[in-house]
């Protein structure tokens, strides 16, 4: 594991009001950077004062979007500890995303050490109010100054930190979701299962359309048949249909969420019947019509568990759980956040102390 140099800021910023954090708008005093060059590999890991980067306008990330990112959170416990939630899963997924995007992966132990070190330097920035956390954004960008289309030979890996509240302004209140049947997010064989900025750029057009209709997010259908439910983009999606917990099976174009995996583990542990399979939009509409669609919720690092109160597909507006928070969504939210913040015993060994 590489040694990380620390250059502390001489101008610490004022800490934000924890009642007004929003999501991803405020950044801490420091950031982590490491460089990659062909021949030297990943080198010079350091923590420096948070600030702008200087990049050549021809840097490849600006032109061909060769970049990947991750998202995880650090939480204060009531007894003075700081916990990360399953950072090994993020390190593994980062490696998979790097391989798909021809980026040399950061060794997993350096990835986790970078996160732990920068979080401990900015430990005072972790908010303590219920529902808040320190959102951690690791990312890698291609920095070769060249307009030819090929994998870059140089990169930067950074970790920035943002004290954040709920991802949706509505908090745990149910969100309205728009099922999109025109634009698609990702196709099989593409980069849908990598955490790559390009997937999010591809989502913006439909997001604009759903915003205009008063919906919080878009639920994507598969890019081949435009028939099967995939994911929301900022979160994976779950349904409770006729008493069974159902979520789309990973198929190469869906992001393998860490919170998704944790919800599946918890539901199985509780003895619930769980199915990972293809779910057609027709099945969903008919379950909503015959009353067997009991619940719907999203799962994600930023969103945690986000109950869905309304799903709209074309002219069909489906109200779920009476527009309120369903019992499974509430139980998962309470358990996941309880483990993350140390309030509930972590019998799965998911949390890592910083
Ligand atoms: C996350 O949940 O960490 C995400 O990356 C979703 C998002 C804010 C793009």
Image (tube, rainbow, N blue to C red):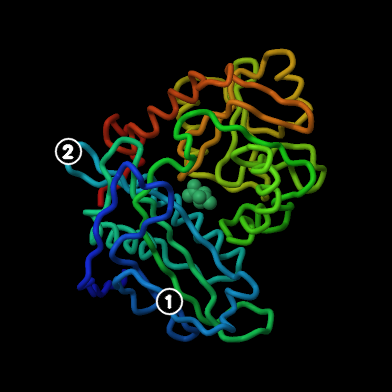
Which residue occupies 48% across, 29% down? 173
* Viewport quadrant of the N terminus: bottom left
x and y, in percent, of residue 38 in the image = 50, 84
- In terms of secondary structure, where does tag 2 sit? loop
Q: Disc 1 vs disc 2: which is toward the camera?
A: 1
| Mark 2 closeness class: few <14, some 14–19, many ≥20 residues within 10 Å | few
Percent across and percent down for residue 323 are: 57, 21
Please determine whether, in this image, residue 240 is positioned above or below residue 339.
above
Please report the residue visible at 25 percent of the width from the left and 75 percent of the height from the top: 5
For label 2, the residue is 79
Question: Ligand 1 near label 1 (Cβ, under 8 Å)?
Answer: no
Q: Report the front residue among 91 and 229.
A: 229
- The answer to which of 99 and 118 lies nearer the viewer is 118
Which residue shows up at 56% across the image and 83% down it? 57
- Tell me: 108 left or right of 68: left
Could you give the CA–CA distance between mark 1 and mark 2, rounded to whole angstroms? Answer: 37 Å
Q: Position of residue 3 (x, y in %)?
A: 27, 73
User: How many numbered discs, if any?
Assistant: 2
Q: Which residue is mark 1?
A: 53
């Amino acid at each position: 594991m590489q040694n990380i140099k620390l250059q502390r800021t001489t101008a610490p910023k004022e800490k934000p009001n924890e009642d007004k954090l929003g999501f991803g708008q405020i950044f801490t005093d420091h950031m982590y950077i490491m460089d990659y060059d062909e021949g030297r590999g990943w080198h010079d890991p350091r923590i420096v004062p948070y600030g702008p980067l200087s990049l050549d306008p021809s840097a490849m990330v600006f032109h061909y979007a060769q970049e990947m990112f991750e998202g995880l959170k650090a939480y204060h416990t009531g007894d003075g500890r700081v916990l990360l939630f399953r950072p090994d899963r993020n390190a593994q997924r980062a490696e998979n995303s790097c391989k798909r995007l021809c980026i040399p992966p950061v060794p997993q132990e350096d990835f986790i050490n970078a996160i732990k070190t920068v979080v401990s330097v900015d430990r005072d920035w972790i908010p303590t109010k219920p529902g808040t956390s320190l959102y951690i954004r690791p990312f890698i960008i291609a920095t070769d100054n060249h307009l030819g289309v090929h994998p870059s030979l140089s990169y930067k890996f950074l970790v920035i930190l943002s004290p954040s509240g709920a991802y949706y302004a509505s908090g745990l209140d149910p969100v309205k979701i728009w099922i999109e049947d025109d634009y698609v997010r990702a196709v099989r064989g593409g980069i849908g299962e990598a955490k790559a900025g390009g997937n999010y750029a591809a989502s913006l057009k439909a997001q604009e359309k759903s915003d205009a209709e008063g919906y919080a997010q878009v639920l994507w259908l598969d890019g081949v048949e435009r028939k099967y439910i995939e994911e929301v983009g900022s979160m994976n999606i779950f349904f409770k249909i006729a008493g069974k917990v159902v979520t789309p099976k990973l198929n190469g174009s869906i992001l393998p969420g860490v919170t998704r995996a944790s919800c599946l583990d918890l539901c199985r542990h509780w003895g619930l019947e769980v199915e990972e399979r293809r779910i057609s939009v027709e099945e969903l509409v008919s379950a909503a019509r015959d009353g067997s669609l009991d619940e719907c919720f999203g799962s994600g690092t930023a969103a945690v568990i986000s109950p869905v109160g309304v799903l709209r597909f074309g002219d069909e507006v489906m109200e779920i759980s009476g527009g309120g928070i369903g019992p499974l969504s509430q139980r998962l939210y309470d358990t996941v956040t309880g483990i993350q913040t140390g309030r509930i015993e972590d019998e799965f060994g998911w949390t890592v102390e910083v």
